[in-house]
Amino acid sequence: MTTEAIISTRDLSYSYPGGIAALSGVYLDILPGEFVAIIGSNGSGKTTLVKQFNGLLKPSQGHVIVDGLDTRTTRVSELSRIVGFVFQNPDHQTFAYSVWEEASFGLKLQRLDEESIERQTTDALRAVALDGLRDRHPRALSRGQRQRLATASILALETPVLVLDEPTTGQDSLSRRQIMELTVDLHGEGRTVIMVTHDMSLVAEYASRVIVMQDGQVVCDSQPKEVFEREEIMKSSGIELPPVIRIARGLREYGFSDTPLTQEELVENLITAIRR
Amino acid sequence: MPTIDIQYFKEDSFVHRLHPFTKVLFEIAVLVTAAAFNEPLFLAAVILAIIGVAALARIPARRFRYMWVLIYIVLFMVITQGVWFTSFGDFGDIDVEFEWRTLFHLWPAWAPGGPRIPVIFEGANYGFSLGLRVVAISLAFPILVLTTHPSDLTRFLSQIRIGPWRIPYNVIFVFTTAFRYIPTVSREFDQTLDAQRARGVHFGGFNPVRQIKVLTTLFVPVLTSSLLSAHDLTLALETRAFGAPTERTFIHEVHWRKADWLVTALLIVVAVVCLIMANRYGLGVLPYTPQRNI
């Protein structure tokens, strides 16, 4: 198990300076190609956990091994070739004068040849539908476009692992859908996707594995269906079930006991139940 | 955890309870004493006293951790003064037989044309004292901000009256907002630092040209977002009728207590004694202080 995991944490604990414990005793193995959703209430340690995955935070205790490298002894710039990290607020990273320059910056840092920079940047911009705006100033873009540009600047690095920290927060439903389609495509290409989110519909629909954080600990780590069926955990970590599951729960007294993850599944199950 | 952490924190210490004016006076006293001396030992004593006050205020040492950057300033002063010190020319009445002590040569003897560019001990010592002044002032400043609630500062400033004149509230507001925004900007800075590191920017390293380039990736986002949030702030102020022509009142008043009289008196005495020591008796002043009339 350990040998094939791309990210593994062993007895990982972390306290912020000043002694506030943010993570305690986390053991995780994230396998290549997984689509992991990390959920939990604000302050449960989600972001602290994912910041351990690319060395932005170093363990206070225990170890984080990323593709065989111990994050304690590896530079963040080194780990950034393996783990791409898309932040929630694009304005914290945009500094360049053009979309192209912004998106290709990380590749230039890696000292790649012109041809690869050209190709990878074009691919990344095309993936987020910004390839027509390569000479535009980033500040002249809309909020949604800036978010996509920030995503493209990470995509261009072509890292095997992608961490998305609340990618859909504050986005309208169109951008939300675009981001999720993109993420699904990337996952389809074989990348490992780790997503921190509060959007339970997304979790239900896309994730292959759900990690529930509560008070700095992993309280549940399983497939979406099983996680959403653990009612006591959902309640104690303050997670509201996705609408389809809430509908299904409302139908429980009529003998409907399924936990559907998508609208289609709900409809299908309902029809079968009615016909029966 | 912010890199630069100078935000007010609640604590029931002697320093916290002092009137803001007393603490402003403390800053002034530090400025005066640090300027009076240029002998490293005396400045070290000033720094020790400041650390004593910080301990009295129960400020955790980690809040001063970012001060390590001051080492570079001290080093810079020591080296530049060590090399160029003698070019000041006029050193007052030092002995005729006074000789500069050469520590070493930047261009060593074994190199062609060497030895050249001597580093002078006296210059390095003088540079060290200049560096220590910067350290003293940099250490003292956060004590005011860390131990005084921003609204106490506002209140104190609005209470100042000279005859009918008062500090316009707009000015006070600008001043206290600047304080209030230090932690915000510091947080922006940290988030930007994280975002850039996450895409492979390596901060630190020895190539100065590369470092300057790398710093733009930090300062451009921080400055733009600060300007944008300043713009948001003006809008928020407008909607809350900032500048409406009314008398401002405060729920809490800051009180001047007996301890403030004592501390104020003590600070004035210390500052005056230090000035007299330095200027009348030359105590704590290097014998080879450059004489300049600006």
Image (cartoon, rainbow, N blue to C red):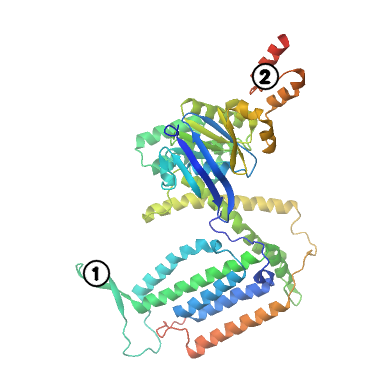
Q: Can residue A95 be seen in this view?
A: no
Residue depicted at x 68% and y 81%: B262
| Residue pointed to by mark 2 | A266
Q: Residue B120 carries which label?
A: none
Residue B222 pos. (x, y %):
54, 51
Locate the C terminus of chain A by quadrant.
top right
Nearest the eye: B165 or B185? B185
Q: Comparing marks 2 and 1, which lies closer to the viewer?
A: 2
Tell me whether circle 2 and circle 1 mark residues in contact (CB < 8 Å).
no
Q: Which chain carries label 2?
A: A
Residue depicted at x 41% and y 33%: A3
Residue depicted at x 53% and y 71%: B137
| Residue pointed to by mark 1 | B108
Q: Residues within 10 Å of mark 1 (few under 14, many from 20)?
A: some
Q: Is residue B134 visible?
A: yes
Residue depicted at x 70% and y 35%: A235
Q: Which amino acid does label 2 sit on?
A: Leu
Residue A87 pos. (x, y %):
54, 41
How far apart are labels 2 and 1 at the CA level?
83 Å
As drawn, is A184 to the left or to the right of A157?
right
Q: With respect to residue A8, does B176 lie above or below?
A: below
Residue A178 pos. (x, y %):
57, 29
Q: What residue type is labelled 1?
A: Pro
